[in-house]
Image: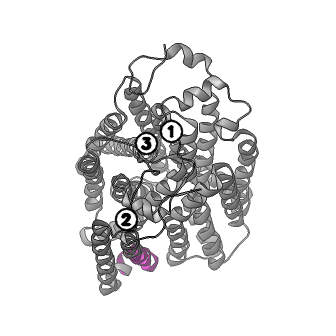
Amino acid sequence: MTQTAGGTTAQAAPLASIGRYRWVICALLFFATTINYIDRYALSVLKETLQANLGWSDVDYGWITFAFTVAYAAFPSLTGRVIDRWGVKNSLALALVLWSLMAAAHGLVGTVLGFVLVRFFLGVAEAANFPASIKAVAMWFPQRERALATGLFNSGTNVGVIVSFVTVWLATTFGWQTAFVAIGAIGLVWLIFWQRAFYPPEQHPRLSREELEYIRADQPPQQESVRLPWTQLLRYRQIWPFLIGKLITDPVWWFFLFWLPSYLERERGQNPLQSAWLLALIYTGATVGSIAGGWLSGHLIRRGWPVGKARMCTMFLAAVCMPGSIIAYYTESFALSVGFIALATACHQAWSANIFTSATDMFPQKVSGSVVGLGSTTGGIGGMFITLLAALAVQWTGNQQIVFIFAGLMHPLSLLIFWLVLKGRFEQVDLAAARDLSRVHPPLIVAGLIVTAVGLALVGLIAANWHVCVAAATLSGAATAATAAGGVAVLGLTLVYAGLPHKRGVVSA
């Protein structure tokens, strides 16, 4: 028997015979994401080696990381638009070639300025990974399997962090220059398999008719003839829970990624080697959470649950466990602390698999790259603030308790926003439907003015307390937060622009 969208009949027998080529595509996306994180995290694990060999100060290192952070936050919106226009195959191939070359170029430069430049362009190229991968999943997987596929490839972020310590072995054995060149070369090997294996499903010579029909079975009609200026996507209310959710929950992952080592060492008394093993354990848990979160919502959909209810239920389970990070800080038991941190990272990744998939639930493939790119930008802006927040918390209180509390509350808040705006209904927008863009959109303009005012106020607040911010987070950390505040103001102006009358709206491609 065949399961229809929203039906309850299992399709176990046909699944064994229709083919599984779509999981080859998922594997390629997983390896691309793993390579992405190995390349970006290599600088962190080789920090001490590079400072010893090149004479860097902490300020120099801060400016190098600043260059990557700004590029990675600023460019996803642009790269998402490019992916929608050029297609996934060419866009991701070009991005991976560029970031592989930039990763290898780390071994060919020796000055701070040289590292700043290659780090900036590494951030530009790596900004394409998630918009392209989410769009590829939407192309290749039925709605009931998208979150699982997203969870699987997204687990590459955790694997990439864990195996990036192989970079230390390469640097110790062959020299730090060779280590960077070697990890850059890995991406070029991936490219060979990508070029041979990836095509749109309808054009793939190795995809069976049965698997193609299965992929398309519960997907809404495609709107490939539709083209929409990306700023006008902001007029659709479905995009707002996604953008706000990324803005306030992505910083939690950035905090765990960059501040956990110092927490384990300074506040829990672990040495660097012990911290490395504990981080590997924690990120292994995050990998399990990413896959389990994707599997659960897909399982519920196969059992007949509506898509929105299945996603919201899974996100609810992840969100209600996130306050465990608060318990992790306050408990005196070190084992319990590590356990709750592992739970929090696992739940964040389960959340991430579903919030990413919500973008393709509510927007057609034609614009999914732009939607995910906008979300990545808002997430990047939020992430840029966490460095200053964590540093100020340590300066003011001597510990990181404020940030652990922040990490425990953002996912429940985001879940509440999803419910208030969507009421659990993830309905795909019809871009081809008539929408009068020649009129002013007052809510967008009001929201834009408020966001602009908040951004400018943050810029002024940071400027007025510049010496305090620099003392807490170094010059580059303060500059990162100031840049993010400026980004908030620019985002607000973008909302105002989107709310103004426009002559062109939805047009044929």
Q: Is residue 309 left or right of residue 120?
A: left
Which residue carries the number 2 mark? 386
Q: Is residue 256 left or right of residue 168?
A: left
Q: Quadrant of residue 16?
A: top right
Amino acid of disc 3: Asp
Q: What residue is drawn where x is 30% and y is 54%? A: 407
Residue 492: x %, y % from top left: 36, 72
Residue 295: x %, y % from top left: 44, 31
- Whether residues under marks 1 and 3 lie with C-beta atoms below 8 angstroms apart, the answer is no
One can see residue 45 in this view: no
Q: What residue is drawn where x is 58% and y is 57%? A: 128
Compute the Cα span from label 1 to label 2. 41 Å
Q: How many other residues sit within 10 Å of disc 3, few (<14), some (14-19) or many (≥20)?
A: many
Magenta segment boundaries in residue numbering: 471-486
Q: Quadrant of residue 227?
A: bottom right
Quadrant of the snapshot with the C terminus: bottom right
Amino acid of disc 1: Pro
Which residue carries the number 3 mark? 361
Name which of mark 1 and mark 2 comes first in the sequence: 1
Amino acid of disc 2: Ile
Compute the Cα span from label 2 to label 3. 29 Å
Which residue carries the number 1 mark? 221
